[in-house]
Image: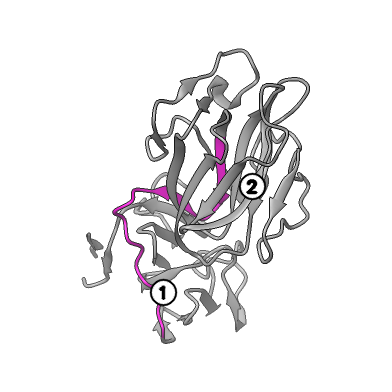
Amino acid sequence: MALSFIVLSILVFPGFASTAKAATVGEQLKAPEQGWKRFDDHNPLIKYNGTPLNQSSGQGLYNDTGYGVLGKDSVEFYFTGTKMRFIGANYNNRSTSANIEVYIDGALKGSFSQYSSSLIAQVLNFEVTGLSDAKHKVKVQSNDNGLFVIDAIDISETGDLVAPDVTPNPTPTTTKLFVGDNSMYLLDANGEVWSWGSNDYGQLGLGDTTKRTVKTKIPGLTGITDIVVKDHFVIALKNDGKVYGWGNNTSGVLGAVGEIVKQPVNFENNITVIDGAN
């Protein structure tokens, strides 16, 4: 059997209002919340147009690093997913007006201030949710040449930072049914996967080994473009090139994650095609 991979104020415009969370805009957020993941300001996929200013260590910044952006300089990055948070650092040398603008896919989505009477690192400065599950370009810049600091970026837990030339695979426009060994899988037009049937090895991807008699959506698995069903295990290709797998892992094909994998785990990246031929 072989698998082959071919391959603090905030101004928010209508339609992009923040959703109530345990953390709210303007508060300190030292770690990503459930459903989010964090990338440091030094990540090579975050581009600085101009010369970023290294911030002094010992200020409580995430990973003890931060970059200042001044004048007409800007920050740009691309990500996949449905939501994004800008984590910054507030201080009394920043503008009191909402002078820092956030553009997503070329459209202004909102602005914020980083003013504070004292230094506060790892501040949730801006949040946007409800984006399409696709690749997005983000640009952050000051509208009055003032200083702002980037500390980190939080995005959807199932998303990723990607290079500008990475094009996510399109989600399917038709529904596909896949037949396994006493189990069934449906890939719907929204890129979500449903499963039912036998589940002795966790091959339904639902977090347990209980069989299902009706189709059940696999949680947290979105943007899927194709799946391959094998002997009690499944792999799925996401539209950003990530490959997820679950089920029987006695061969270790999914990595050192246990012999029974009950929910999808990411084990490959930058894949364009999955081929299930023997």
Separation (CA) of disc 1 from disc 2: 31 Å
Front residue of 164/52: it is 52
The quadrant of the image that shows the C terminus is bottom left
Front residue of 94/262: it is 94
Badge 1: residue crowd in 10 Å (few <14, some 14–19, many ≥20): many
Q: Nearer the viewer, mark 1 or mark 2?
A: 2
The residue at which mark 2 appears reads as 111
The x and y percentages for residue 271 are 29, 58
Mark 1, secondary structure of its residue: loop
**Image-based side of 141 in relation to 165, left or right:** right
The reply to whether residue 197 is in sight is: no
**Residue visible at 53% across and 22% down?**
65
Q: Are marks 1 and 2 in contact (CB under 8 Å)?
A: no
Q: How is the image coloured?
A: one colour
**Residue visible at 57% across and 28% down?**
147
Q: Magenta segment, which residues?
A: 152-173
Q: Which quadrant of the figure has residue 126?
A: top right
Front residue of 28/212: it is 28
The x and y percentages for residue 251 are 35, 54
**Image-based side of 246 in relation to 125, left or right:** left
The x and y percentages for residue 259 are 46, 52
The residue at which mark 1 appears reads as 171
Badge 2: residue crowd in 10 Å (few <14, some 14–19, many ≥20): many
User: In the image, what residue type sits under mark 2?
Assistant: Ser
* Mark sitting earlier along the chain (1/2): 2
**Residue visible at 63% across and 59% down?**
129
